[in-house]
Image (cartoon, rainbow, N blue to C red):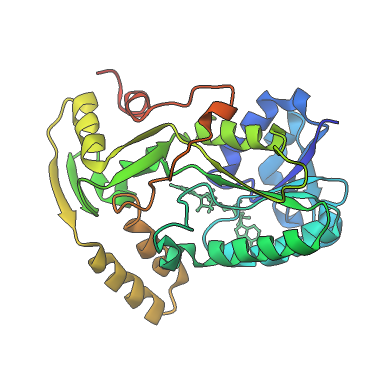
Amino acid sequence: MAPSVIVVGASGAVGRPLMEEFLAQKSQFRRIAVLSDPSKVSRFIEVQAKGIEVVEGSFLEAKSYEGFEVVISLVGNVAMKLQPGIIEAAIAGGARHFIPSEFGADIAQNGIWKNRYFRDKVVTREHLRARAKDTPGFHYTLILSGAVAEYTVSEFNGVDVEKHVARTYGYPKARLHVTAMHECCFYSVCKFIVGAVLLPFDDPSQSIRELRVSGDCLTWEKLMELLEEVQGAKYDIKYLDPALAVEKQEAARAQGDSEGELFWSATATMANGYALLPEPSDNHRFAFEPETAKETLIRMFGSE
Ligand SMILES: NC(=O)c1ccc[n+]([C@@H]2O[C@H](COP(=O)([O-])OP(=O)(O)OC[C@H]3O[C@@H](n4cnc5c(N)ncnc54)[C@H](OP(=O)(O)O)[C@@H]3O)[C@@H](O)[C@H]2O)c1
């Protein structure tokens, strides 16, 4: 039977293009819904008019998830720590497939999990593992898609695409996987998420699944070379010690500035080897060709 799916955090950076991708593949789903706080439903008027259901309620209440088998969480940085509560409510409401807010690094690798940015994702993974053990029929999918390609060459990484200056925390030889996700269009990350909902588990008794997907894999230095080539401009590039970002993270924490703490912990991840996904890739399990890094840069900055 076609799945029924509800999305938490659908108004965010990943959520907006994801709902467009769901609409593009609407015929494959029995129900597609966004969960919205009652005071914020007006944000979903456009997608609602196109056929997305809007469920009004709290993401911590079981009744919000009743009638949906699949729950996708796209909560952002500050709400990330609330995911265990979302998982509990989803299970109590009858959901049987949970896709948590991941869409980045493989945080199980090489001590990456110790980075502050990933703390709440680690807690979420532990919670999911425990609940998958004691809840018959409950399973979950971790979608690991490396760095969002469009965010690599942005202020977030100290890349000024107008002045052609880059001051990036990290290292030129750091390798990273990138996957496109354009704000106003629906690109590879969203196609992988919708595809993952439709992709059956290989073994029905399996409760945990990881899908490693991406559009490209390259060094940070190569990414900057491609940017120079596509823009026809030479960059003034300097690499900053990631330890300096950790100092800023700690200063933000000491001031009780959670958003700042998360920002600085994330800023030294893309050019620091954290966005490199271990092989094998699961791209072959999806029926589309994701955009490469060069294609993304050409789309963003014009033709070569
Ligand atoms: N790998 C990468 O490069 C990369 C880049 C971007 C994002 N990501 C990942 O993608 C995921 C989603 O990130 P995003 O950038 O889309 O986040 P975002 O833009 O900050 O959106 C967050 C969403 O969460 C909702 N939210 C916030 N507080 C909430 C709360 N207390 N209860 C319920 N919902 C709440 C927001 O709704 P309201 O507006 O109502 O608060 C919004 O819809 C995260 O896991 C992030 O790490 C990865």
Image x and y of residue 102, in percent? 55, 51
> Up-down: is 22 above or below 254?
above
**Residue that extends furthest to the top in the rendered view of this protein:** 303
Q: Is residue 59 visible?
A: no
Residue in the picture at 82% in, 31% down: 2
Image x and y of residue 25, in percent? 69, 25
> Up-down: is 56 above or below 115?
above
Q: Is residue 280 visible?
A: yes
Is residue 172 left or right of 148 when viewed as pictured? Answer: left
> Up-down: is 91 above or below 194?
below
How many marks overall?
0
Image x and y of residue 195, in percent? 64, 32
Image x and y of residue 247, in percent? 28, 73
Q: Quadrant of the N terminus?
A: top right
Residue in the picture at 30% in, 69% down: 246
Is residue 95 left or right of 189 when viewed as pictured? Answer: right
**Residue that extends furthest to the bottom in the rendered view of this protein:** 254
Residue in the picture at 49% in, 22% down: 289
Is residue 143 left or right of 117 when viewed as pictured? Answer: right
User: For this rendering, which residue is in front, 293 or 252?
Assistant: 293
Q: Quadrant of the C terminus?
A: top left
> Up-down: is 73 above or below 17?
below
User: For this rendering, which residue is in front, 136 or 27?
Assistant: 136
